[in-house]
Each structure stands twice: as C-alpha cells, then as structure tokens.
Amino acid sequence: MTKKKVIIVGSGVAGLASALRLNHAGYEVVVIEKHHQAGGRLNRIVKDGFTFDTGPSFFSMSYEFRSFFKECGLDLPFEAIALDPLYTVHLAGSDTPYHLYKDIQKLSKQFEAVEPDFEKKMNHYLSKSGKLFHDTFNPVIRNNFDNLFQYVQKLARVNLIHVPVLTRTFWEEICRHFDSKEAREIISLVGFFLGRTPFDTMGIYSLLSYTEFVHDGYYNVKGGMYEIVHSMVKILEQRGVQIQYNTEIVSHTSTTNQLTAVIDQHGNAHTADHFIINSDAAAFRGEVFGRKSYSKKKLDKMSWTMGYLTIYLGINIKLKDINHHNYYLGSNYEQYKSDVKNHDLKGEKPYYYVNVLSKNNPDCAPEGCESLFFVCPVPNLNDKPNWDDQNEIVDSLIRDFSERNGIDIFPSIISKTVYTPLDWKSQFNLYHGSGLSLSPSMFQIGVFRPKNFDEVYSNTFYAGASTVPGSGIPMALISAELVCKRVYAFDNA
Ligand SMILES: Cc1cc2nc3c(=O)[nH]c(=O)nc-3n(C[C@H](O)[C@H](O)[C@H](O)COP(=O)(O)OP(=O)(O)OC[C@H]3O[C@@H](n4cnc5c(N)ncnc54)[C@H](O)[C@@H]3O)c2cc1C
C-alpha cells in the first residue's frame, strides 16, 4: 500500500512534533519552513562566538516530552535539567533578590518580614490552584472539540467550586491570598507567561502556580533550549523526513472541499493527501486561504498577546552575582493594570527578564565571557507599529540592568542582536508580531479558538500556539497530539 503524504507548513515545536508522530505512524511527511532553520520561536542565534536561545528559556510539564518521545518509539533525546530555584526576582529599590524555591518552607523564609503567615497562605493558594489544575487540565485542555455542544458538555463536568474564579483576573485572585506588594507581585509573575499581564489574564490561570511550584516545576536543557529542536530535526532527518527551508507558503489550489496544493513564494506547487498548518491558524486562514471570517479587519479585532523586544548580548566579562533566570520588577509594576499600551518604554520598566545561558552552559560563550538574553514585553504592532526608537529603548534596558547589578556592561558588549516585534513578524509570520499569538481570553480558548481542523478543506488541519490548546512548549506538544488524532480519524472514517 502506498503511504499517504502529509505536508506540514512550519517547523515550530508543534510542526516538528506532528512530523515525528505521523512519520512513526507510517505517513510520508514533508515539512516546509519559511526560515533558514527549524524551530520557529524556539530558535537559536550563533554569532561572534556566542550562542543564544531566541525565545523560550525554560519549560514546564517535562512528562509531556517523555510521553511524546515514548509514543514515537524513542527515549528523551536531550538532557532536561530541573530548576530549583525556579528563577530569581529582583524588586526595584532592594538589593536582596527573592529566590523562587519549590520548597515552600525555604521560599517562605524570604517573605517573613513582609507577609505574615506566608507559608500558610502559599500552601492554601497552591492547594486551590492544584485543584483547578487537576479538575480542568485533562478533561478540558487535552481534548479535541468538534462543536460548542461538546465543549459545554466537558465544561459542565468541571467542579462548580471553580466558577467564582472565572469572574476574577489573575491579579484579583492573587490579592485574595496575599496582602503584601512583594508577595502579590512575585507570585503573580507567572501570569505574564501567557503573553498578557496578571491584570488582564483570567484567574483560572492561577493553576500555573501549581504547575511551577508543585506539579513538575521548570526545566532547562543542557546546551541550551535549542537542543530540543536540534534533536528532533536530527531524528526526522534520520527517518527520511524532508525539511525544505527558505520556502514560504503564500497561496494554494483547491477543489470545493479539499486543499490540493500549497504554493510557495517562487510559484512551486506542493501537493499532498493531507496538510497541517503550523503557521498562525487565524492569519493563515485569512491571508493564504482568503477567508472572509479571517479578513484583516476581523483579525485586527481579535485580542493578541503583547509583543516582545528581545536583546541578545555577548559581553567580555563574567557576571558573578547573577543567576541563570532573572526577573527585574520596576516600582511601577502595577502600572500594567491601566496603562500597558501607553507606558513610556524608554523610562522605568515594570518588568523584564534576563537569561544568562552561559551560566550553566559554558560552551555558549567564549572563555571569560557571558551570553545574555533580555525579554521585555512591549505593545504589539497593532498598538506600536513604528520601532524607529528601538535603540533608545534597548539602551534604557541595558542601563537599568547595569545600574541594578552595579556594573556598567556597555563597554563590555562585543556582540549585539535585537529583535523588535517587526523582526518576530517578518521572520516567523507572527501576526502583529505578538509573542504568544492570540490571547487566552474567555472567548479565544477551547472551542472559541481557531479550530485545529479547517472549516472548508476536509484534508487540512492546524497545529501550534494559535489553535488548541494554546501557547507554550508543552501546549505545542499537546497540539501535535490533538491534530494527529484528527488526521487518523479522517483516514479511518
Ligand atoms: C520571546 C519568547 C519567549 C518565550 N518563552 C517561553 C518559555 O520560556 N517557555 C515556553 O514554554 N514557551 C515560551 N514561549 C512560547 C513558545 O515559544 C511558543 O508557544 C512555541 O514555541 C510555539 O510553537 P508553534 O509550534 O506554535 O510554532 P512557531 O514557533 O510559531 O513556529 C511556526 C513556524 O512556521 C513557520 N511559518 C509561518 N508561516 C509560514 C508560511 N506561510 N510558510 C512556511 N513557514 C511558515 C515560521 O517561520 C515558524 O518557523 C516564548 C515565546 C517567545 C516569542
């Protein structure tokens, strides 16, 4: 019997994971990628002797990777390193950083002076967050929904005690448990990991606190996060899966209900039995398939996550007192509540992150040097289309980092690369350059998110952050599992 052929448009984590699953299930798979290397947002810059991860710097739910590779007949092909502390938080005006230990007693000692009964409050908060996780994750998140009825049926099985949290924001939920500014700001930080702020992210995502502190924590990868992609690509190549780089899909041909080919920027038609789109599931429907329900006007009306300004610096000194994962909070953290779009990007930053990859991976920087990666949430291109002021914003971040670490790093910079939302958009087709795709708001999750099957072409499916279940590396793996179930069901129908 001839193998059925699947074309996957995009080699992000969900694209690669779908490719591996389908190859293991006996399909002929071809991956078509716009960029010159695989990985999408999880990418790598190698420059001036330094190595930088471009996007994700740690991941949760390591068991998703283990079960994924096991189901493809493989052992975990990279070394995952559990983080403890999970990360370090530097508050404005304080020289004492908070280390986010998983051991709650150890964590609590740091809050003794500012938040009485922190340990009791934290344990209570985590037990509530854990219940939320266990009651919703497998029943709702790890599921394909064909229609609203199926979705409502699943939701109806969720324990009603969680209903009140649906009416609150993440920040409001945190404020019910903690009184001090320090505890509120630090414990709410995880609210940023969904691409918005704790002030406009739904309270149900407080389940993330359980995933970070209790459930499985966070993991790094030895050699850098890109080793995940590197190992997946190596396996795919060994198994004969072709990945075609520098090839962007811009058009298509079809019958009334089947996609027959995707067409690249040079006019070449790529034919297959099935297609999986790992590009943005909303924007691709609008821009490539020309769907009216995803016209530019409609796409612009959707709620998109913030953009990221990312800076990759190679410096020729060592920073002794800094950890691998660091968050810097400004005295204006709560400004995000009202003013996220208009806040002065050259002034004090409410929040930014600095990763020092070379701290635990000496090969990622020349001897005596350090490889630094800054992530600062900024308005996406819908709110800030012009980035002519990028140098001033970048300098203000480096200056703040220098002041807070008591060492001027400007004279030590020997390598510098900057990605504004314009670069994220042009390199990986991220709509509006938004870092984490569509916001996970009430009417953009579950059955309301762009579906992972096409409404018109029955042989076309979607995988990745902009379809179900959502953003983040573990979600990309689950998305691949869900889309492959769709392909198998289609073939067995
Ligand atoms: C700065 C930053 C930090 C992050 N940090 C973390 C973190 O610490 N932990 C975590 O879990 N997650 C993190 N994330 C989120 C995580 O990176 C994403 O959720 C995940 O990588 C998305 O994977 P994806 O499969 O949806 O594909 P994407 O990464 O979006 O890749 C899609 C691929 O499709 C290609 N493509 C698009 N359109 C076309 C086309 N028309 N033709 C051909 N190819 C096309 C693109 O070039 C790209 O390679 C971060 C994201 C960013 C931007």
Image: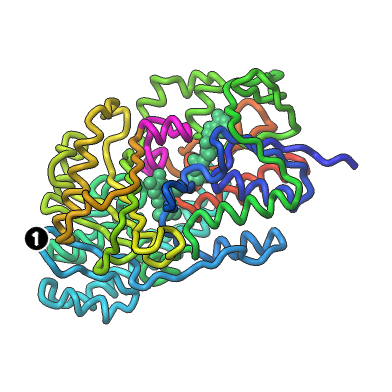
Left or right: residue 280 versus residue 277 is left
Residue located 59% across and 21% down the image? 265
Q: Quadrant of the C terminus?
A: top right
- Rendered position, 85 above or below 315: below
Report helix, strand or loop for mark 1.
loop
For label 1, the crowd category at 10 Å Cα-Cα, with few meaning under 14, some 14 to 19 and many 20 or more, is few
Q: Is residue 451 visible?
A: no
- Across and down, in percent, residue 43 comes to 48, 47
Q: Nearer the viewer, residue 251 or 183?
A: 251
Quarter of the rendering containing residue 304: top left
Q: Quadrant of the N terminus?
A: top right
Q: Is residue 434 found inside the magenta-colored segment of the image?
A: yes
- Looking at the rendered structure, the kind of residue marked 1 is Gly
Residue holding disc 1: 93
Q: Nearer the viewer, residue 433 or 359?
A: 359
- Across and down, in percent, residue 335 comes to 14, 45
Quarter of the rendering containing residue 289: top right
Quarter of the rendering containing residue 133: bottom left
- Rendered position, 61 above or below 234: below
Furthest residue toward right: 1
Q: Is residue 327 visible?
A: yes
Q: Is residue 437 found inside the magenta-colored segment of the image?
A: yes
- Across and down, in percent, residue 63 comes to 54, 66
Q: Which residues are magenta?
A: 422-441
Residue located 66% across and 40% down the image? 243
- Across and down, in percent, residue 117 comes to 17, 77
Residue located 71% across and 34% down the image? 274
Residue located 19% across and 59% down the image? 185
Q: Nearer the viewer, residue 382 or 91?
A: 91
Q: Decide if ligand 1 comes within 8 Å of the CB at mark 1.
A: no
